[in-house]
Image (spheres, rainbow, N blue to C red):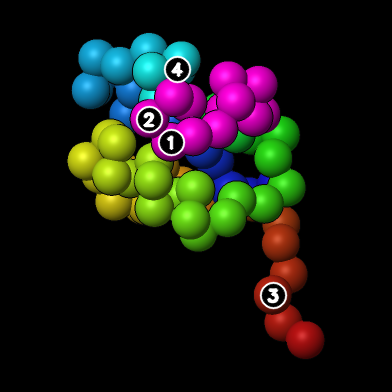
């Protein structure tokens, strides 16, 4: 998937542990782990909002689009 999740980077910058963020956001540590590893297929805006508030950051600090080589965008 061409979306990279940079939660580990933001957690390190804020000197916050995953369990602290999960508690602040109101999600389970397991669900946060799924997000961090990029295995999540979707994220609710409500959850993204809570993460951004807890980490004092923008959605673009957490989510990054990675262009894949050889993609054909012409239709």
Residue 65 seen in render: yes
Q: Where's the C terminus, which quadrant?
A: bottom right
- Asked if residue 56 lies left or right of residue 22, the reply is left
Q: Give the mark toward the camera: 4 or 2.
A: 2
Q: Give the mark toward the camera: 4 or 3.
A: 4
Q: Give the mark toward the camera: 1 or 4.
A: 1
> Do the numbered discs 1 and 4 sit on residues whose CB atoms are within 8 Å?
no
* Residue furthest to the bottom: 75
Q: Which residue is mark 1?
A: 25
Question: How far apart in space, not on screen, are marks 4 and 2 (Cα)?
Answer: 10 Å
> Do the numbered discs 2 and 1 sit on residues whose CB atoms are within 8 Å?
yes
> Do the numbered discs 4 and 3 sit on residues whose CB atoms are within 8 Å?
no
Dot 3 crowding, Cα within 10 Å, few <14, some 14–19, many 20+: few
The answer to whether residue 21 is above or below residue 73 is: above
Q: Give the mark toward the camera: 3 or 2.
A: 2
Rendered image quadrant of residue 13: top left
Q: Which residue is mark 2?
A: 24
Q: Helix, strand, or loop for circle 4?
A: helix
Q: Which residue is mark 4?
A: 18
Dot 4 crowding, Cα within 10 Å, few <14, some 14–19, many 20+: some
Q: Is residue 41 magenta?
A: no
Q: Helix, strand, or loop for circle 3?
A: loop
Task: Check residue 66 in the rendering and tell me which mark sits there, or answer none.
Answer: none
Mark positioned earlier in the residue sequence (4 or 2): 4
Question: How far apart in space, not on screen, are marks 3 and 2 (Cα)?
Answer: 39 Å
Question: How far apart in space, not on screen, are marks 3 and 1 (Cα)?
Answer: 36 Å
Rendered image quadrant of residue 56: top left
Mark positioned earlier in the residue sequence (3 or 1): 1
Q: Helix, strand, or loop for circle 2?
A: helix
Residue at position x 55%, y 32% from top? 27
Question: How far apart in space, not on screen, are marks 2 and 1 (Cα)?
Answer: 4 Å
Dot 1 crowding, Cα within 10 Å, few <14, some 14–19, many 20+: many
């Amino acid at each position: 998937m061409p979306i990279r999740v940079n939660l580990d980077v933001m957690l390190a910058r804020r000197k916050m542990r995953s369990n602290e963020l999960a508690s602040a956001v109101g999600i389970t540590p397991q669900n946060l782990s799924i997000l961090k590893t990029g295995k999540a297929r979707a994220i609710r805006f409500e959850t993204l909002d809570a993460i951004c508030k807890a980490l004092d950051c923008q959605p673009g600090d957490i989510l990054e689009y990675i262009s894949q080589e050889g993609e054909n965008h012409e239709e």
